[in-house]
Image (cartoon, grey):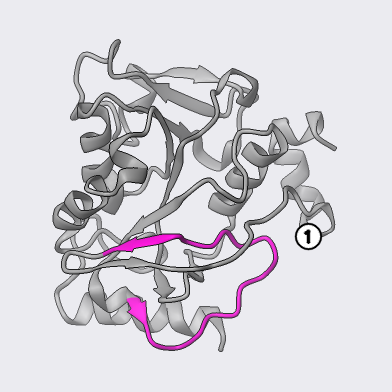
Amino acid sequence: MKKAAVRARIWDRLAADGIARFPFPPHGRITNVEGAPAAADRAMALPELDCADAVKANPDAPQLPLRRRLLKAGTTVYMAVPRLGEEACFVELDPASVSDLDAAPTVSHMGNYGTRVGPEALPEIDAVVVGSVAVDESGARIGKGEGYSDLEFAVLREFGLVDDETPTVTTVHDVQVIEETIDPGRHDVPIDVVCTPTRTIRTDPGPKPAGIYWSELGETRREEIPVLDRLA
């Protein structure tokens, strides 16, 4: 099964069935979807997130309701800067020092409310929130195809901040949970819990990536991501 074909099919359906929400078009992104707040409510009911002190979360629109709920529950949220393009490649959003818990976890405002930090300044991460285009019930995931979410996990693992036991959670619409089996690469981060507006699916995905697989990184990407120089 080709991941690109699955992405195209899911994006087309989200558009055709009116499931996609702003921003448009739904193609080429972790698409915002109808029911994202309900999926976020399900995720917050998970003990993995309800008791978390520090969560690394993706910056995409469908996970914004979850990032807001995490901050309002007192959890510090860490978001990566776009494409890991700075030495201080994460933004720390500490709810104790953020004045606007609704605006802070948005892509356009996280830099204004948060603090830029390098991986060495992060605590051990209690859980990771990931955006998905599609996911199967075994926990294999398809993202939008750029690989930054997987690379962010790999960087955190290289710094000893996540491991095989760190729970990974994604929120999606029900139609994004597919019946086909996704064949993941060794760098693909599997999902432990999938939350939709109507279902909570616990998977058994096995080990997570052990770190950065240098042979799979192109030279251009190495040059564009400053933190990689410290790990090579």
Residue visible at 72% across and 48% down? 211
Depth order, front residue of 129/118: 129
Q: Position of residue 133 (x, y in %)?
A: 40, 68
Lateral position of residue 220 relative to residue 16, left or right: right
Give the residue type that dot 1 points to. Answer: Glu
Where is mark 1, residue-wise? 216
Residue 186, percent from left and from top: 70, 65
Which stretch appears magenta? 177-195
Q: How many marks?
A: 1
Q: Is residue 207 visible?
A: yes
Q: Is residue 103 visible?
A: no
Q: Find the residue positioned furthest to the top.
A: 97
> In which quadrant of the rendered view does residue 29 lie?
bottom left
Percent coordinates x, y for residue 194 in the rendering: 35, 63
Residue at 59% x, 43% y: name it.
152
Question: How would you rate the neighbour count of disc 1 (Cα within 10 Å): few for under 14, some for 14-19, many for 20 or more?
Answer: few
Residue at (45, 60) in percent of width and height: 192
Please name the residue shown 50% across and 39% down the image.
82
Q: Position of residue 145 (x, y in %)?
A: 54, 65
